[in-house]
Amino acid sequence: MTTPKRIVVLTGAGISAESGINTFRDNGGLWENHRLEDVATPEAFARDPNLVQRFYNGRRAQLNDVNPNPAHIALAEFERNFAGDFLLVTQNVDHLHQQAGSKNLIHMHGELKKSRCLNTGRIHNQQTDINATSLCECCNTPSLRPHIVWFGEMPLDMEEIYQALEQCDLFISIGTSGNVYPAAGFVEVANSVNARTVEINLEPSRGADAFQEAFHGPASVKVAEFLATII
C-alpha cells in the first residue's frame, strides 16, 4: 500500500477516557441532577451563568490530574516524523494532545483551558475558575464564558477541516462514537475523494460500515500499532 501524503485524524472521547477523563454521558447524562442540555447551551448560560461556570470549572479542574496516554503520544511522535501534510482534529476539549506534543491541531468543540470574551470575541488562556463576576482581561468587565461549543452552536474551523478532508488520502477516526455530527460525517467526505478510511475504536462505532478498515481494541495499543504500518 502506498505511503499517504495527506492525513486527517479525528479523535473523540475514547482516546481521552484511557487517561481517566470521565465523559458526561458515561455518568448517566446528569450533573447535580441537571441534564446536559441544562449546562451546555447558550440559553442555559443566559439563564444561570454560575451553574454553567461551575460545571466547566469542575471539568477544568479534572485536567490537573490526568496525563496523555500512549495513543496521544503516538500521534504526536508520528506527526513529528511524517513528511507529508498532517491535521489532527479533536472533538475533545481537554489539553492532552497539546501536552503530548501535537502541533497541527484543531479543537472543533473548543477547549476547557480557554475562555472567550462575550464583548470582543477574544480568546484567553484560562487555568482558574470562572464565575459570573470574573473580569475579562481585555475589557475589564464580567463577560467571560467557557470557550466551548455548546449545543446549537457551530463547531470551530469547519472550513479548514473540510478543505483538509477533501484533499486527504488517509482518514483515521479514533475513539469516536459516530453519533455526533458534523464529525460523524467526516468519513463520507473522505470516501468521496477515494481516501483510505480507517476506524480505531474499542468497539465498532455507529458509523463503522462507512470505513474501509477497522481495528478494535484500546486506543493506547491500537493507535501506535497502526501508525507503525504507515512509516
Image: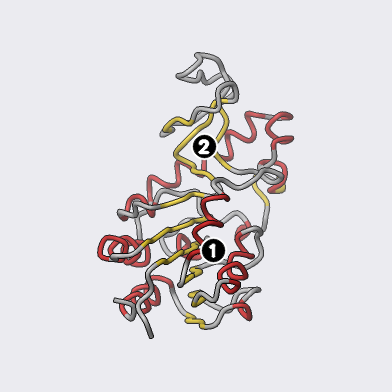
Residue pushed farthest left? 81
- In the image, 41 versus 161, the foreground residue is 161
Residue at (51%, 69%) from the top-left corner?
Answer: 173
| Disc number for residue 64 | none
Residue at (46%, 64%) from the top-left corner?
Answer: 8
Q: Quadrant of residue 144?
A: top right
- In the image, 208 versus 34, the foreground residue is 208
Going from the N terminus, do you reach mark 2 or mark 1 first? 2
Determine whether, in the image, residue 29 is placed left or right of residue 119.
right
Mark 1 Cα shell of 10 Å, populated few (<14), some (14-19), many (≥20):
some
Element type at marker 2?
helix
| Disc number for residue 166 | 1
Q: Where is residue 162 drawn, in percent x and y?
A: 56, 57
Mark 2 Cα shell of 10 Å, populated few (<14), some (14-19), many (≥20):
some
| Disc number for residue 57 | 2
Q: How is the image coloured?
A: secondary structure
Residue at (55%, 15%) from the top-left corner?
Answer: 141
Query: Which amino acid type corresponds to the residue marked 2 in the rendered image?
Result: Asn
Q: How many marks?
A: 2
Q: Where is residue 111 drawn, in percent x and y?
A: 49, 43
Determine whether, in the image, residue 44 is placed left or right of residue 168.
right
Query: Which amino acid type corresponds to the residue marked 1 in the rendered image?
Result: Glu
Determine whether, in the image, residue 82 is placed left or right of residue 17.
left
Element type at marker 1?
helix
Residue at (60%, 60%) from the top-left corner?
Answer: 183
Rendered-image quadrant of the N terminus: bottom left
Q: Where is residue 55 drawn, in percent x and y?
A: 58, 40
Q: Quadrant of residue 154?
A: top right
Can you say whether 29 is above or below 146 in the image?
below
Can you say whether 31 is above or below 119 in the image?
below
